[in-house]
Amino acid sequence: MIQSLLIANRGEIAVRIIRTCREMGIRTVVAYSQADADSLPVRLADEHVCVGPAPARESYLNIRNLVTAGVLSGCDALHPGVGFLAENAGFARDVKDAGLVFVGPDPEVIDLLGDKIRAKHSAKDLGIPVIPGSSGSVNNAEEALHAADGIGYPVIVKAAAGGGGKGMRIVHGGSQLADVLAIASQEAEKAFSDGTVYLEKYLENPRHVEIQIVADRKGNVVHLGERDCTVQQNHQKLIEESPSPVVTPALRARMGEDAVRLLRGLGYTGAGTVEFLVKEGKHYFMEVNARVQVEHPVSEMVTGIDIIRQQLLAASDESLEITQDQVRLGAYALECRINARSAGRVTQFMSPGGFGVRMDTFLYAGYHVPPWYDHLVAKLIVTGQNRAEGVRRMERALSELVIEGIATNIESQKKILAHPRFRSGDYGTGFLGEILKEGAL
Ligand code: ADP
């Protein structure tokens, strides 16, 4: 079993990992940048090591400093968290070469899944439905036009190495394609140092539904049901829930089986998410996130299973604590992401509580939110007997939440929850864009 873990991350996910480690008796060492010296993970961890100055590329993305911190602080494993280097195969390799366990899938698997074209091929080979698209990368306007004619407009140009909603462009007709291709490829080159792009059919207003997987090295690959992440702004998730209002038991079973088959086929270990788009009752594979995700608490609350704990067990070559038969999907869970819209000192902070409420955050009164990193500052998660009760409980919890001194999206989350379309459960990924146009936010 892992004895001592370097957490190569910050913010709420670092706090989240520390909490499970403490319960498991694992010593934690958190790596932090100079901008995070007074952060909650630094306060909560058993030990802390400064890995560089505020800019992420000099600290949280500094592979040499992170690996050295792990070795010198006597850790036997490293957890990459979410974002930063969590899906960087080179990092996973360097961690292993330094003699530490990397909490995540093997570098070869991260490599394969990091290339969305290869990931789609793997899914297709296993008979999993994928979004129709170009058979591989499109390297010039001529190839793109040919592929798009076969797929039918609208199409979406996507970066093979993409992530975080970056490098995606929708094209409605052939006349725009050459220009958009060039722009998307340049964007991808800039963001991911890889300008490879491919085409997909652009599904109008689909649902985003993903399956949470946990897998160990002993052949257990278990799915924990779905999360619906259809409420998105600029392709970035804002609200997640389980079960999905549109997933029937039959669809859940098919998606779960497909997700398990894919990750079993790839020899995947740890926590991972298989993302699908759902349209007219059919699911289409999109990509795999080879790490734990921001929205994992939704599945934890709906199943009662600690996903970080399963990740740490799998990384330690232990068995998962559950088999598929033992997974009980509970009634309902809902998460609202609380994002900062400005940096600065939090002058007042009050966390909601009470029955069925969970708060994952690194905020405290007096904390200075640095301007350097991701804008996610808290995740509010509630459970309920059904969707209506869960939504009401979330409204109650949001009304208790006080964050002063920085601007946040709390008020806009309240408006989304109150919107009749959200209440009806009947909408697609375009929902937020539509209500923004109506001026409802
Ligand atoms: P990233 O890895 O950058 O987050 P994804 O491939 O996961 O990108 O897609 C993010 C979101 O973009 C999806 O949830 C969906 O809203 C939208 N999207 C991606 N591909 C398509 C598509 N073919 N048709 C319609 N929407 C899409």
Image: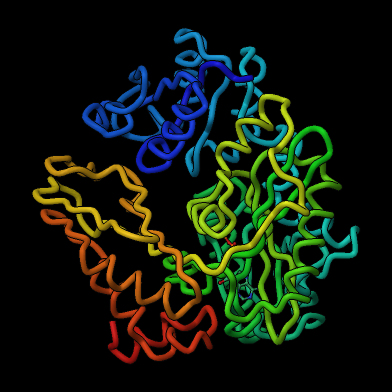
Foreground residue among 73 and 184? 73
Residue at point 12% right, 41% down? 366
Residue at point 74% right, 72% down? 284
Q: Kindly indicate the quadrant of the structure image that contains residue 102.
A: top right
Q: In the image, residue 230 lies at what x, y percent?
A: 53, 74
Q: In the image, is residue 172 above or below residue 293? A: below
Q: In the image, residue 286 lies at what x, y percent?
A: 69, 64
Q: In the image, is residue 224 above or below residue 245? A: above
Q: Is residue 196 visible?
A: no
Foreground residue among 95 and 258? 258
Q: In the image, residue 438 lies at what x, y percent?
A: 33, 92
Q: Is residue 409 visible?
A: yes
Q: Which quadrant of the render holds ligand 1?
A: bottom right
Residue at point 51% right, 62% down? 165
On the rendered image, what quadrant is the C terminus found in?
bottom left
Q: Is residue 441 left or right of residue 148?
A: left
Q: Is residue 391 left or right of residue 287?
A: left
On the rendered image, what quadrant is the N terminus found in?
top right
